[in-house]
Amino acid sequence: MTGEVRVTARARIVGWMLLLVGLALAGSVTVTWSVLSARLNDRVDNELTHEANKLRSYMGNGVDPATGRRATDLTELLERYLVHNLPDGYETFFSVVDGRTVNRSAQDPLARLDLDRAFVARAARAKEPTYGWAESSAGDVRYAVLPVRMDGDPRQAALVVVEFRDALREEVNETTRVLGFTAFGALAVAGVVGWLIAGRVLAPIRLVRQTAEQIGESDLTRRLLVRGNDDVAALASTFNRMLDRLESAFAAQRRFLDDAGHELRTPITVIRGHLELMGDDPDEREETRTLLMEELDRMNRMVNDLIMLAKADRPDFLDLGEIDLADLTVDVVAKSRGLGDRRWRVGAVAEVRVLGDAQRLTQALMQLASNAVRHTGDGDTIEVGSAVRDGSVLLWVRDTGPGVAAEDRERIFERFVRAGSGPRPAEGAGLGLTIVASIAKAHGGTAFVQSPLEGGAQFVLDIPLRPVVDAGATTVVLPAPEVMR
Ligand SMILES: Nc1ncnc2c1ncn2[C@@H]1O[C@H](COP(=O)(O)OP(=O)(O)OP(=O)(O)O)[C@@H](O)[C@H]1O
Ligand SMILES: [Mg+2]
């Protein structure tokens, strides 16, 4: 992960958050505005109805609450009504008698409709309570003309109630604006806080990146500090475990190279020494030549073994196929006869077919057989056998030689280790058993040596191979999972 990618990740997280929250806020502000606007007209109509009811109840008794006197004519009645009923900030009331404005409520209205001749004339014509819309200098207004009659006064009179709807709407707009500003102010604060939090959350990932950058092939010892038990801590642990594996893989590779270099130096020194000391005597030259050829052969074998061991960890090391274990066991004995004059025997044979690499398994058993030959004499018995036990396939080579000392049983499987107890210890490179062990490991199993009661050594490959099951015409292959690696 590069620096730019990290910044982009942070910006992307915060950007998406802001976009989503911003859309949600914009939506809720718009909805609020439309709901308030829709309620506005209802509110205005309610006000007009309310005023009409008030006037009706006032007309009902016609008594002035202040003086307790009845009005004598329409002008006085409406004047008193206007004195006692005060409009709020978005209303105005006035009385029209015989086509002219007579009184107006005391508060200054937002627009003087009482001075609008056309409007007053229209109001004067109303015989019944009339509701309508009109234009004014303060925008659209909703009005009601409420005609008033009185016994003994034949004049035409009406109370006009005006609601400044557009002015009220401006109030709604103002409320919405304040709401919008507050919401988007909060959004900006959330953006800043989100940016800081995203930075904190991504900081451990940055640490992982920086550590990864600092780790070179030469120094795999660095590890990340694991704090807490969240996802980032899990990432750091996984990363550390990967480094553990890499470190041990590199260390193994280095040991392999060290060992190989060290072991190859011996035959080179031997060859060089012989060549330097070689005289002119033809017999001696012939003898040296034979010796050098043998040494070169040994080197060649060692290099081939090393190449094979280097390949053993690769996934394509095995070429899996169906193997008939009984055939394999018998074949190994047949091939081994050429290795030496011994009493070769086929021990138990497992009559099963399994999934594995027949060539590699044969190679492992041949290594064991050649060891057995090297550690036995003429007339000794060498047995090769196979069996299925506890879901495992066992393949073994057993001899009647000197056996392996208890303290050597594990270390002889290591590279270049020769126990030295055999009759001709210098001959081998000490790679044979390592190859056997790596073939067993590649099949998901192990190799070990045990000492039978009757003496000698028994080298065993224990491989968790499951039998291949024949189901009618089709063959169902059930390999152990490890084998598939
Ligand atoms: N059948 C055996 N009986 C007793 N000791 C054995 C037997 N097989 C192996 N060993 C001991 O284990 C050691 C390691 O064996 P390994 O096959 O790895 O090496 P090697 O046979 O010496 O050399 P290479 O196989 O590379 O030619 C041998 O040196 C020997 O001491
Ligand atoms: Mg060997």
Image (spheres, grey):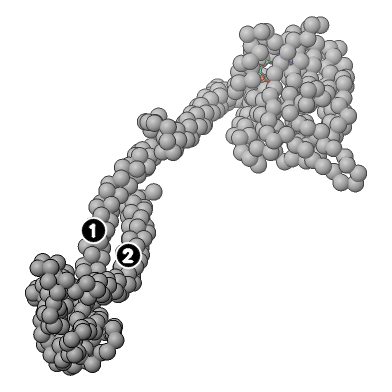
Q: What element carries label 2?
A: helix
What percent of the width, then of the height, locates residue 415?
60, 23
Q: In this view, does 207 lie above or below 435?
A: below
Q: Residue at x 44, y 38 (%)?
A: 231
Q: Residue at x 34, y 62 (%)?
A: 28
Amino acid, disc 2: Thr
Which residue position is annotated with label 1?
A: 182
Which residue position is annotated with label 2?
A: 32
Alpha carbons under labels 2 and 1: distance apart? 14 Å
What percent of the width, then of the height, locates residue 260?
55, 28
Toward the viewer: 296 or 347? 347
Toward the viewer: 424 or 136? 136
Q: Would you say 382 lies left or right of 229 here?
A: right
What percent of the width, then of the height, locates residue 122?
22, 92
Q: In which quarter of the image is ligand 1?
A: top right
Toward the viewer: 329 or 62? 62
Amino acid, disc 1: Thr
